[in-house]
Amino acid sequence: MSFTQLGLSDALLRAVNDEGYTTPTPIQAQAIPAVLAGGDLLAGAQTGTGKTAGFTLPILHLLSSGAAAPLNNTAQRPIRALVLTPTRELAAQVEESVRTYGKYLQLTSTVIFGGVGINPQIKMLKHGVDILVATPGRLLDHMQQGTVNLKNVEILVLDEADRMLDMGFIKDIKKVLAVLPKKRQNLLFSATFSEEIKALADGLLNAPAMIEVARRNSTVEIIAQKIHPVDRDKKHPLLAHLINTNKWSQVLVFTRTKHGANKLVEQLAKDGITGMAIHGNKSQSARTKALAEFKTGTLQVLVATDIAARGIDIDQLPHVVNYDLPNVPEDYVHRIGRTGRAGATGEAVSLVCVDELDMLKDIQKLIKRTLPSEIVEGFVPDPNAKPQPIQLRTQGHRPSGGGGGRSQPRSASAGARTGGAPARSQGPGRPSGDQGAARPAAPRRSGGRGR
Ligand code: AMP
């Protein structure tokens, strides 16, 4: 199967070719014709499968072949496609993809999310854009202020819908759905299908095409994974040792908490290793800066908490380190999915102390394999060490006002899991008082990358 068989316009095929893609990924091969046919779509696919191009390319095709307002009259360009994503990072990356794939088209796009000033976004929306990528909270703010008009939306995408529900965005999504035109095309992407997602899909989608690709495990299969058993207080020296002896130049490190991320960055700095942390307490501009420096290779180590890292798209990231194991086993797959993307091989190592053995068990059950274990010389763990409970802090807050700051002990004994919603190290952060300095760029034509 080649891209030329999918029915995309020459302008899109050229952009795809520029990216060096030769073959559509399985989700693209199925989603692109389905979306071009104009119907609704329910797709089971996680990050790393090429799903973004899977919806972006056909949307660009549909919008560019329909009648568009004249380019010199941007104020009259209504929003025709709306993409909702759970996190700011993912929103930014999706919009980047819109610009990348649409670079030979005359369509405009912009991204709006919280944590940055709202006024530049208002200005951009006033200019008029064809494609809007947004996080739900900030979009709702614009709706309440009357600064966005969604009455002409023809295509709606809910990207990573399961994460949006996990993060408490359901009410916001419903408020957005209520103002959209009844007649429109709906695309829902989700890595998992809980009852809640099924209910959302039932209410939203009309006779959808259904696609499911790349079970979680398939991402796992191309990534070399191992664990290093280590004492809890030796994790930092072990990490520094691994970075230095293996000469790792680009390492994404996951910690369970924001505090843990900050502390690790400080400790690594003392070893002469440059790192930055990204998590929900950092301003959007600090997060964007850290990610940009990491991508270009200036920054050696990026330390992230789970939600902050969600959707980070770094081509050919060679090393992922689980400094702490995640308390939600699915997050392990999301974390290591940052490496070995789209066919490239990667390596993921986990530093596991005695407190985390139950978490390891849960992860191994999920991925249906036992991870090879290797004790690093000089870091032999104390065989008599006793497990201690792990404090799982849910430091974030749900947009609906739920659950900030609780801490749930998780003992090392089996069955100590708390039920219900998984505790997360931090939340998405609705638009806060933080009207940070990072200004989103002015509305762009898809083609006008000029950076
Ligand atoms: P996504 O699942 O959308 O986050 O995409 C994962 C990664 O795959 C991104 O880095 C894309 O640039 C890359 N990618 C998307 N489509 C293809 C393709 N057909 N061939 C190779 N790489 C691709």
Image (tube, rainbow, N blue to C red):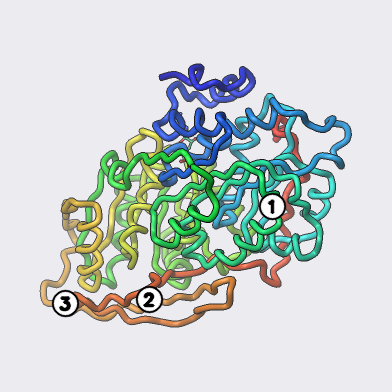
The residue drawn where x is 70% and y is 45% is 153
Visible in this render: residue 85? yes
Q: Nearer the viewer, mark 2 or mark 1?
A: 1
Q: Position of residue 392 (x, y in %)?
A: 37, 76
Which labelled disc corresponds to residue 180?
A: 1
Asked if the residue at tag 1 contacts the one at tag 2, i.e. Cβ–Cβ closer than 8 Å, the answer is: no
Identify the residue at image location x=65%, y=35%.
99
Image-based side of 79 in relation to 371, left or right: right
Q: Earlier in the sequence, mark 3 or mark 1?
A: 1
Discs 3/2, front: 2
Does residue 182 appear to the left or right of 395 in the view shown? Answer: right
Assess whether mark 1 and mark 3 are in contact (beta carbons under 8 angstroms). Answer: no
Q: Position of residue 11 (x, y in %)?
A: 64, 20
Q: Find numbered disc 3 in the image and state the secondary structure of the residue it sits on.
A: loop
Q: Give the amino acid type for the residue marked by disc 1 in the picture.
A: Leu
Residue 385's mark? 3
Residue that mark 2 sits on: 392
In this rendering, is residue 435 above or below 297?
Answer: below
- Residue at image x 82%, y 33%? 69
Q: Secondary structure at mark 2?
A: strand
Amino acid type at circle 2 is: Leu
Task: Point out the image quarter for the C terminus.
Answer: top right
